[in-house]
Image (tube, grey):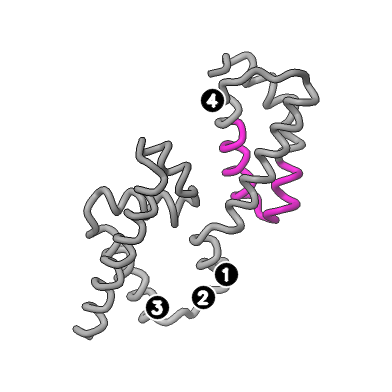
Amino acid sequence: MRSEEEANRAVERYADTVRRICMVHLKNYADTEDIFQTVFLKYVLHPAAFDSEEHEKAWIIRVTINACRDMLRSFFRSRTVPLEDCEGQANSEKEDYSEVVEAVQSLPSKYRDVVYLYYYEGYGAAEIGDILHKNTNTIYTLLARARKLLKEKLEEVEEIE
């Protein structure tokens, strides 16, 4: 883990670069700030030393681009629309959304955590495995089982209505 001085120096040196890259990819200030925090958190937690300033800058840029791409590919982002586009949305769609949230919340913890990290936070299976200290294949299995449970729960809700 890096010291506070190193982190502050990196933020001062690379903040503009990170923000510009994010704005080019994301075109959204709020998402830019999220990625900004993610990049510098990864920097602080990155254990290896850099060979030079150029190596450090290249690493920061690569991490920023990857984080932006991950956000753009995330399930959550692909299933959302800007708030302005939601005006006049039917109540039934809002009810459907709340049913999905309730179904996810009713899952056992081991499934709920994996679903949250994968779909809402945008982590890949390998990253979730690192976070939860589980094998990557175990994460894939938990995701498959969680999807099956969610499908069953949501089909039950449809049958009731």
- The image's mark for residue 84 is 1
Marks 2 and 4, how far apart at CA: 41 Å
Q: Is 49 within the magenta?
A: no
Q: Position of residue 84 (x, y in %)?
A: 57, 70
Q: Name the amino acid type tagged 3.
A: Glu
Residue in view at x 45 percent, y 48 percent? 125
Q: Give the Cα distance between marks 3 and 4.
A: 41 Å
Question: How far apart, in angstroms, are the residues tagged by discs 1 and 3?
Answer: 16 Å
Q: Residue 22 in magenta?
A: yes
Circle nearer the N terminus (3, 4): 4
Element class at badge 1: helix
Q: CA distance from mark 2 to mark 3?
A: 12 Å
Sequence-first tag of 1 and 4: 4
Measured Cα–Cα span from mark 1 to mark 4: 37 Å
Which residues are the magenta region?
A: 19-40
The residue located at (37%, 79%) in the rendering is: 91
Image point (34%, 75%), residue name: 96
48 or 45, which is in the foreground? Answer: 48
Q: Secondary structure at mark 4?
A: helix
User: Where in the figure is residue 1, as x and y percent of width and height?
Assistant: 53, 18
**Foreground mark, 2 or 3?**
3
Residue pointed to by mark 3: 93
Residue position marked by numbered label 4 in the rendering: 45
